[in-house]
Image (cartoon, rainbow, N blue to C red):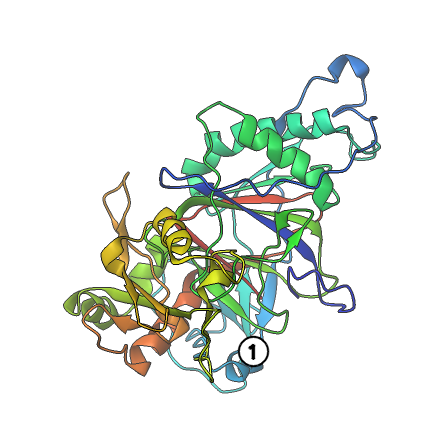
Amino acid sequence: GSAQPCWKRLQVGVGLKLFSGFAPFTFPPVLRHRTPLPRSCAPLASSAQATSFSFSPSSEQLEPKEVQLHKEWFRNWGFAEPEPPKSKQIGMGGMGAGGAKGKKGKKGPARSAANSKLFIKAPDGDLVTVFRADRDESAPACSEEDLAAWGAAARQTFEGSLDKTGAVLLRGLPMRNAEEFGHFWRGCVAAEEPKPLVEGRYNSMGPSGGRKKLSGIDMATNVPPAFLLLCHNEMCYNPTTVGRICLYCVQDAPLGGESLIARNSDLGKSLPKSVSDFVKKHGGILYSREYYDAQNPPKVPPQGSGPWQTKCSLPEDGTKEQAIEFFKGMGFTDDQMEWDEEGGLKLTNQHPGFYTDPTTGEDLWWNIIHTGNMKAADGTPFPKKVVADIQRTGWEHTYAFKLRPGDWLGCDNIRGQHGRL
């Protein structure tokens, strides 16, 4: 399953992703192409309560309680397989063997029989704070104004609860298409309390100029449904990143497509010490991308590359000056942009691989070494064993659950990771 808008696949749902700014920069808004909505409905059945837009804490169990991890998912894409827990009765964090529930606080699992089944559990209230909208869910479609009001109320609930667990799930919201969600998001952005919101823009390391959109709203991912999307922090490879990410479910996948969630502090603690020692010894991580000039393309474009005009959402005759302005908006400096005689561009930046939690002072694991194609800051390739250890141990603290229509999941992008089965 996936968040791809591919209606011919059975194992597909539709999700939307929004970003809020982490650094003081602003890009053009993604909200556009709005169409009028029916002007009926209220958040509650009584007209006297029509101005009440609120959420109540919920103790409901996220489902499914457990999801099987199939070994072919890892083998097909060259990922290291999780190691089963030592006992069929004891799992590690979010993972269990033989269908049994796991328990926290146990020592790392050892290898088990090749035919052992692995299951990943749903998160509890310690990882995700759940609220439900105080509304009559059988009411007809909402007006634009009501949807914006729900957005403002959701924003206040989200901001007031995020510090508790780093992830907030709001359920029972009325939006069922991208247009309706756009009005909701407009209300989120417009809300000045508790503090103004800076809207970010998605910029991957690849050649794409952005994600596919529905009615001007980013889809949750461009990754194909068949691909296992490992847990990650959004845009941790860019000089400027985002502090929060939000996912909204318009249509869930009939089968599969569970969302993954993990806490960075837990992931760092489960890694072998040799992994973090290697990262620190070699100065962190080197992130590098190369783009060519659309007006002077190479005969054989390098794999994973593309025109910098496409990356910057410029026409084919876009100028170097426009590209420089775009990349500076992403946080790159002049000395991180290297232009060649053919008009090609190489972008590089370094990151220590850890981020200091401003509240606790703890060093949080924060990088994408698990993708397997990174180099250390000094140019040393990460050994295959280091990459495999990161991929394998990450599952010990990863949890899965299904987003349903009307679910809005907001995550602290510094403290927590997200992914998709």
Front-most of residues 314 and 369: 314
According to the picture, the residue beneath numbered tag 1 turns out to be: 73
Q: Could you tell me if residue 352 is visible in this image? A: no
Q: Using residue 361 as the reference point, say whether residue 220 is left or right of it.
A: right
Q: Secondary structure at mark 1?
A: helix
> Which residue occupies the extreme bottom position in the image?
114
Quarter-wise, where is residue 338 in the image? bottom left
The N terminus sits in image quarter: bottom right
Q: Identify the residue at horizontal 51%, vertical 79% (top origin).
A: 74
Residue 328 lies, in percent from the top left, at 34, 49
Residue 126 lies, in percent from the top left, at 46, 45
Quarter-wise, where is residue 235 in the image? bottom left
Residue 100 lies, in percent from the top left, at 55, 67
Q: Taking 78 as reference, is 226 above or below it?
A: above
> Which residue occupies the extreme left position in the image?
281
- The amino acid beneath tag 1 is Trp
Q: Taking 18 as reference, is 315 above or below it?
A: below
Q: Taking 302 as reference, is 145 above or below it?
A: above
Residue 402 lies, in percent from the top left, at 64, 55
Quarter-wise, where is residue 22 in the image? top left
Q: Using residue 240 as the reference point, say whether residue 246 is left or right of it.
A: right
